[in-house]
Image: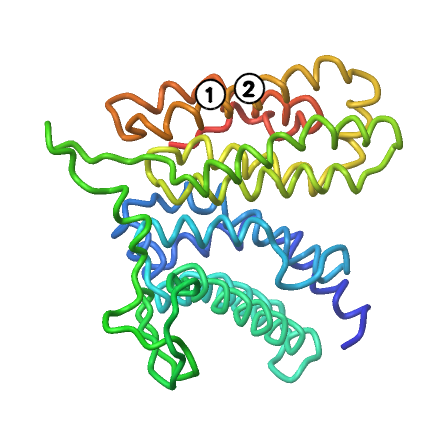
Amino acid sequence: MGNSQKEILANILEHQHSLILDSWKEKELVQSLLLQRDIHPDFFITHFGSRVLDYFISVLRSKNAPGQCPVISVMLHFFQRRGIKLDEVFHICSGMRNTIVDILLELGIKHSDETYQITIELFELNFAGVIREYIEVTCPNKAKNKKISAQKAPVVCSAGTSKTEFVPQIKTPVKNEVLQEYFAKDTDDGVTKVLFMSDDADDMMEYFAEVPELLSQAIIDSDMTKIADVAKIFAKTGSILLRYSPYLDSLALSMQELSAALHEHPAQFMEVLAENGDDMLKLFDAVSIDMDRYIQRFSVENIAMKNAHHIHEPTTLSILQIISMFVPQEFEEGEIEFF
């Protein structure tokens, strides 16, 4: 698999970027699957599809390793909360592959050409990672701390797949029982009640406690690896928040935007941090303080209360302001809209 052929393919995908995304979202099956789950195709392409394609290009240029895309992880948690099945995830992702294949054939690149083979092999590698991760997302082993014997049995996933392996024997299908209990009905008014699970609250508190130190180390040591660590924190927090979809989607996706921007533009971020660190750090502090308040509040108070999303708007705007400070081009076509 020659590097020159990879660069040729990367250039093709870069030049055909808009066409690929437009064709992908217009595929009838992709549109149907997304709209069935009340996901607008434009929303999907803007917040997930475009980032996935950019990541694919970066893998071809050896800037990233295959199967390590933070956007895909957030996307899969989002899909899981919207009830999208594994075969549907496959069809949605295949829409991108089929669109690119169509473009290659239109450009005269034949099935036997190395560039075409690279495309298929790379998609297969990434598909394997997506399928593996989605099975993990939709079939968590809730019984791992219980004293139960392991024996050979089929595992039936909520994503609609099955496989046979040595797993703990249980009497009922594997489900997301822990999350489901937080979506029980209030006895008073029948309104859906959603609270932060204690493990999620603890994780988020731990994550955001690390942010100030990481940013300080980045400034003092001019260490861009610390920026990557901050990006991971926002990606992981976004994934957690999407478990409570649709109530925290706008906040979660703004964090995903920041994570992706930090991954893609670490040098620009470091430059702004060095020149205008006080203003940047104040915004990060504001986000951390807001998150602390949210975690404390929504561990006991209903996330799904009427108009609760307005509580998160200032934090979302702070996150978007951070992005605008080091990648202002993201806002040249107007403010990012999440819904």
SS under mark 2: helix
Where in the figure is residue 153, as x and y percent of width and height? 34, 83
Seen in the picture, residue 146 relative to 178 is either above or below; the reply is below
Q: Is residue 36 left or right of residue 188?
A: right
SS under mark 1: helix
Q: Which residue is mark 2?
A: 289
Where in the figure is residue 257, as x and y percent of width and height? 56, 36
Seen in the picture, residue 133 relative to 165 is either above or below; the reply is above
The amino acid at mark 2 is: Ile
Circle 2 packing at 10 Å, graded few (<14), some (14-19), many (20+), is some
| Quarter occupied by the N terminus | bottom right
Q: Is residue 211 left or right of residue 20?
A: right
Seen in the picture, residue 139 relative to 325 is either above or below; the reply is below
Where in the figure is residue 95, as x and y percent of width and height? 44, 63
Where in the figure is residue 283, as x and y percent of width and height? 63, 18
Q: Looking at the rendered structure, which numbered label has been put on residue 293? A: 1
Q: Quadrant of residue 288?
A: top right
| Quarter occupied by the C terminus | top left
Residue in the foreground of this view, choosing between 273 and 237: 237
Q: Quadrant of residue 66?
A: bottom right
Circle 1 packing at 10 Å, graded few (<14), some (14-19), many (20+), is few
Seen in the picture, residue 191 relative to 101 is either above or below; the reply is above
